[in-house]
Amino acid sequence: MGNIWTIFKRDLKGYFSSPIAYVVIGLFLIVTGIFFYLLLSSFIQYSYAVMMQQARRLYRQCESDDDSSLPVEYERDRTVRDSDDYHA
């Protein structure tokens, strides 16, 4: 096991003494950065689309005249707003 560690250290030192290692590391970092950016941007676009779809659905429900289609919290809010005791 000691011989393997000695050979590993010698090869690692030889690898980093040449400019090839820095080129390989630089390319690796650039490629992983591009993949991370693309993954993050697609996640943000997808979550924004889902959020807008939910907002449009909620807006259509609130816009309709049929109160039975509204969620419970909006029905409760509308009854408070429409009552005679409520003064803005």
Image (spheres, rainbow, N blue to C red):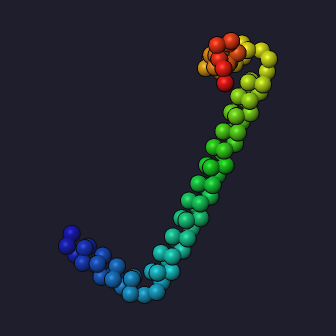
Q: Which residue is drawn at 61% across and 49% down?
A: 43
Q: Quadrant of residue 69?
A: top right
Q: In which quarter of the image is the C terminus?
A: top right
Q: Which residue is drawn at 63% across and 55% down?
A: 41
Left/right placement of residue 16 relative to residue 81 reads: left
Name the one closer to the observer, 67 or 82: 82
Q: Where is residue 86 in the image (x, y as percent from the top left)?
A: 65, 17
Q: Give the answer, above or below, for where 18 lies relative to 58.
A: below
Q: Residue at x 62, y 49 (%)?
A: 44
Q: Give the answer, above or below, for where 34 lies relative to 62.
A: below
Q: Would you say residue 12 is visible in this rendering?
A: yes
Q: Position of residue 9 (x, y in %)?
A: 29, 78
Q: Which residue lies furthest to the bottom in this view?
A: 18
Q: Which residue lies furthest to the right in this view?
A: 65
Q: Give the answer, above or below, for where 50 lies relative to 58.
A: below
Q: Where is residue 74 in the image (x, y as percent from the top left)?
A: 65, 21
The number of callouts visible is 0
Q: In which quarter of the image is the N terminus?
A: bottom left
Name the one closer to the observer, 81 or 85: 85
Q: Would you say residue 71 is visible in this rendering?
A: no
Name the one closer to the observer, 75 or 45: 75
